[in-house]
Amino acid sequence: MALRFRWHPLILERLLLLRTERARMYTFESKVLVVLPAWRLCATTRAGVVERKRRGESADEPSRMNSRNAMPDIHVVHTRIGVVVDLRRNMLAYVEPVWERADLRISSWTSPRSRSRHTVEQERPLLRSVSKDMEREYSLMRRGGPDWLLWSMVEIISDELVLVVLAYREIVNALQDRLHAEGDRFDRENVKLILAASADMDNLLKEAKPLKRVLQSLADYKDWPSEELGRYFDDIRIDVSDALESMELVIDVCNSLKGEVQTYKDGHMNDILYVLTIVTTIFVPGQFLTGLYGMNFVVGYCVFRKICRRVFRASLTGALLLQDDDGAPTIPELRWKQ
């Protein structure tokens, strides 16, 4: 393909190393190479998120997900797509490797049953989603050229990223409601889920930030056949920026939840110590009397004990001595035979 369409050798090199490439835009004469990372929810997770979004439910009001059974499963798949646009030949070629499970910790929360229903091989290619617009009688895809086809693919990637962030927001908001309901009974599994969501959003934020720079480069590119295409790319850049801000918001909420969990645990520990202090205070008088009236005394006299008694009498400790110089107890009750 590279020889037939006279691709630059660097284009071929970038496509062969596509899995290790970061999101970037390259220009080679009349050809544009765009490397785009793509994330997508699996079919089951995506259906639930899209259905709640269609009903107009807000991600900040997950009232129907207060129990663990209602906690939605999250399966995210990931790939990198290479798109080559030849403006002179009016042609577009793209390389889409096999979708793989994204390296996200929160997927370990999903049950084995739901995980077995989904396989990576079930993921449809990105171009299949674009082909629906091309089949319509009137659409931008049929009116425009390969540059509009690139815009459509970038828009789908942006929309899928927004759904991934929305699914994480639903999880975190459900955990927040559960924490406020359970308080100090919030178990460790939920804490692990909070830590996993925070780590996943942090990793996703680092990998998705270069996508914003690529969209800015696409919007500023001056050789597009259509002048309005740059504005469309800029709109997608704004959507990606909002998604990145939502990721930062999820991370902040997770950090806040970790602090709230520690506050609830500290309050529970303070309550336990308060109860133990009351119980200890109740038993202290009995322990004191038991120790006081259970002492053994040896009645006798020695010069050393007499000297010690005289020395201690001169101090405050001497007022608390319970024996006289002969070793006999000074408390009358301790002199009783029984």
Image: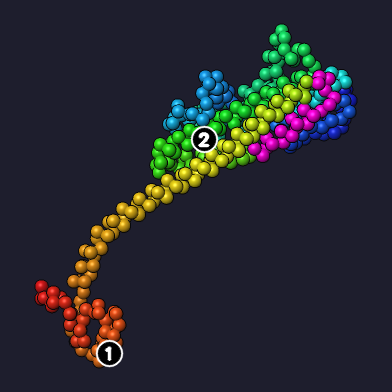
Mark 2 highlights which residue? 172
Q: What residue is at 21 percent from the left and 78 percent from the top? A: 322
Circle count = 2
Q: Is residue 308 visible?
A: no
Q: What residue is at 35 percent from the left and 51 percent from the top? A: 272
Mark 1 highlights which residue? 307
Q: Amino acid at mark 1?
A: Ile
Residue 92 placement: quadrant: top right
User: In this picture, which residue range is highlighted in magenta?
Assistant: 205-227
- Measuring from the top left, give residue 296's x and y in whole percent: 20, 76
Most extreme residue toward the top is 137
Q: In the image, is residue 224 part of the stretch drawn in magenta? A: yes
- Measuring from the top left, give residue 329's x and y in whole percent: 18, 80
Secondary element type, mark 2? helix
Secondary element type, mark 1? helix
Q: Nearer the viewer, residue 103 or 56?
A: 56
**Side of 253 relative to 7 (left or right):** left
Q: Residues within 10 Å of mark 2 (few under 14, many from 20)?
A: many
Q: What residue is at 70 percent from the left and 31 percent from the top? A: 37
Q: Amino acid at mark 2?
A: Val
- Measuring from the top left, give residue 178's x and y in whole percent: 44, 36
